[in-house]
Structure formats: C-alpha cells, structure tokens
Amino acid sequence: MKYFTEENSVEAVNARMGENINPRLATLMTRLVAHLHAFAKEVELSQEEWECGIEFLTRTGQICSPERQEFILLSDTLGLSMLVDQINNRRPAGATENTVFGPFHVVGAPIRKMGDAISLDGKGEICLYEGRILDLQGNPIEGAHIDVWSDNAEGFYDVQQIGIQPRWNNRGVFVTGADGEYQFVGIKPVSYPIPNDGPVGRLLECLERHPFRPAHMHYLITAQGYQKLVTHTFVAADDYLDSDAVFGVKETLIASFEQVDGGNTLWRSQFDFVLSPI
C-alpha cells in the first residue's frame, strides 16, 4: 500500500505503526483510527465542520486549569465517563453500583465521630444519614472508611467557594464498628448546574440540553479485602433524575428522604451499602 485514498484510509494510517510498539497501544490506536475514519465517511464531514471541531477542542484545552478540567466535563456530558466507569466496575448481583467520581472530592477530609454533623455553615435542611456497610452475605463490615461530601444549600461545594464556605464544609470520614453501622448529620443536598460557562456549556446549549445534576450525596467507601466503592445516593423525586447532565443516576441509587416530625433533623435518609470482595 503506497498512497492514501478515501477507500484505504484506515489501512494506510494503521500500516505506519511500528512492529515493536506496546500491544495495548497498538489495539487502542488501530481501533480509534478505524472508528474516526468511519465516522467522517458516514457523515461526509465537511471542511468547515472539521475546522469547527478543531476550534472546539482547542478552546476546551485553553480553559483547562488545575482547578478545572473541561475535557473531563466533556467526557461526562457525552456519557463516556459513565461508560468507562461501568466497564471497569462490573459487580455481582446485590453489590451496590458505582457511579461517577466527580471533580469535587478532596483528599484528607477529617475523620469524625459516628453521628457527627458535617455541615458547618449553618445553611440548608438538616438530614440524618444512616445505614450499614455489608458484604454480599449481609454480614456487617467492620473498619470500613466512609468518605462523604456534598454541595451546600446553594448548590456549591466548599472548594468552589474558598473563603466563603468553611473549610471541610459538608465533608467527613466515618469508620464503622463491629455492627457495620454508620450515621452522620448533613443537609438534604440540592440539584446544581455543572460549570457551563465554557465550550462544553455552549455545546449543551446548542443541543438544547440543560446542565443540571440531580441532588445527591457522594460516598467513597473502602474496606480491607473489598473493592473500592465510588457512588452517590440521589434524592428521590428530584426534577433531574431522568436527565442528569452526566448520566450518573442509577435506579438502585435513588434513596428515600423522609421528613421527620419532632426530631432533631428535618429529614432522614437510610441506605445500606453492599461491598464486593476483591
């Protein structure tokens, strides 16, 4: 094969790869070239459309910073992040499902006493979160670390409002005892828009898609001998459950939030997490 033609474009490009490259890299690049060229041929991509795509990717890279990763946001809104998450976190029946990690986790959140409050700004509708960390047979798991975080009542995470929200607001780590039970006091989270002032936000606008995520509490649960669980619990009846901008909702992760009459909190949400062994 000597020259590049429309008909042999995939073969022409892939034939240039060396014989001694990493086998996995060879597989990834071979298939990427095949799918990219097939897309261009199927839609008969125009020069103007190609230039528009290059400009979009350029602007996406230019807006990236240590605090903002627009390419991950793009992956999220295209459903690719969730697809990769599902491929890499297939679990047996009965185990709690994974969902997207999100960009707002902070390493080093304080370890709190079971039952402590994580909301430090005094805003929002107070909610009691409780449940158990179990194995597939229903046995409690001792020593599980439960790292939790959420937005505040205005829909912002503390790292989005440094100097406005207290440090570690709506964050904390809890460690289970022999009963596997957890309990902490937070707020009932609210739905919020993903950052939509950049090229990804403009793309959503052009597609007539909204940028909102349904209200949720984040969980990162680890325990010796078990697979790490990255997940959320979603507020039942939220307006955006069926149209999450990043496709993170799973039916099994929708949690009840019950109003409490005469209690110390306005809401109560109970949810058991089931870990899969390594």
Image (cartoon, rainbow, N blue to C red):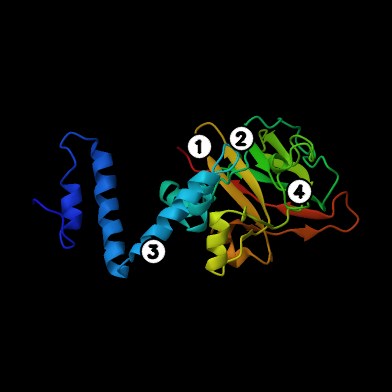
Q: Residue at x 15, y 37 (%)?
A: 19
Q: Residue at x 30, y 63 (%)?
A: 40
Regarding residue 107, the answer to whether it shows in the image is yes
Residue type, numbered disc 3: Glu
Kindly report which numbered mark, 4 or 2, lies closer to the viewer in this rendering.
Answer: 4
Earlier in the chain: of badge 1 and badge 3, it is: 3
Q: How crowded is mark 4: few (under 14 residues within 10 Å), some or many (20 or more)?
A: many
Give the distance between the C-alpha atoms of the residues marked 4 and 2, in whole angstroms. Answer: 25 Å
In the rendered image, which residue does mark 2 sit on? 144
Tag 1 near tag 2, CB within 8 Å: yes
In the rendered image, which residue does mark 3 sit on? 49
**Residue 47 in the image, given as x and y percentages of width and height:** 33, 63
Q: How crowded is mark 1: few (under 14 residues within 10 Å), some or many (20 or more)?
A: some
In the rendered image, which residue does mark 1 sit on? 226
Residue type, numbered disc 1: Tyr
Kindly report which numbered mark, 4 or 1, lies closer to the viewer in this rendering.
Answer: 4
Q: Residues within 10 Å of mark 3 (few under 14, many from 20)?
A: few
Kindly report which numbered mark, 2 or 3, lies closer to the viewer in this rendering.
Answer: 3
**Residue 178 in the image, given as x and y percentages of width and height:** 66, 33
Give the distance between the C-alpha atoms of the residues marked 1 and 2, in whole angstroms. Answer: 9 Å
